[in-house]
Image (cartoon, rainbow, N blue to C red):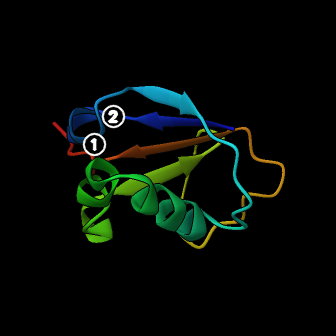
Amino acid sequence: MDVLYFAWVRERIGIPKEKVETEAKSVAELVEELKAREERYAVAFSDLSALRVAVDQELTEFDASLDGVREVAFFPPMTGG
């Protein structure tokens, strides 16, 4: 699946997008796999309350299933204006 990173998440990880092979069943499990990869992922995902996630371009929660998912995006909360 494609994993996309936006704003400061992208800056901390150092790439905007990557293809990820995973056995994770949920977004939370995917995050744990990513955090275990390298320090830069651990730093980016250290405070999940500061992150939002979208699965196949639908805003969702970290307990969302990854069954059949093609894209997961991580980004900071958006503000209106």
Q: Residue at x 44, y 63 (%)?
A: 36
- Label 1 secondary element: helix
Q: Could you tell me if the residues under marks 1 and 2 are in contact, i.e. CB atoms within 8 Å? A: yes
Q: Amino acid at mark 2?
A: Phe
Image location (x, y in percent) of residue 79 = 20, 45
Residue 30, located in which quarter of the rendered image? bottom right
Q: Residue at x 54, y 69 (%)?
A: 28
Image location (x, y in percent) of residue 41 = 34, 52
Q: Crowdedness of circle 1 by 10 Å Cα count: few (<14), some, many (20+)?
A: many
Q: Amino acid at mark 1?
A: Val
Whether 2 is drawn above or below 34: the answer is above
Q: Residue furthest top?
A: 16
Q: Quadrant of the C terminus?
A: top left
Q: Residue furthest right?
A: 68
Image location (x, y in percent) of residue 10 = 30, 34
Whether 6 is drawn above or below 76: the answer is above
Q: Quadrant of the N terminus?
A: top right
Q: Residue at x 48, y 34 (%)?
A: 4
Q: Residue at x 23, y 57 (%)?
A: 43
- Label 2 secondary element: loop
CA distance separating discs 1 and 2: 6 Å
* Mark number displayed over residue 9: 1
Mark 2, residue position: 6
Q: Residue furthest left?
A: 81
Judge left or right: residue 35 versus residue 14: right
Judge left or right: residue 46 versus residue 74: left
One can see residue 61 in this view:
no
Image location (x, y in percent) of residue 22 = 69, 53
Whether 14 is drawn above or below 20: the answer is above
One can see residue 55 in this view:
yes
* Mark number displayed over residue 58: none
Viewer-nearest residue: 56 or 29: 29
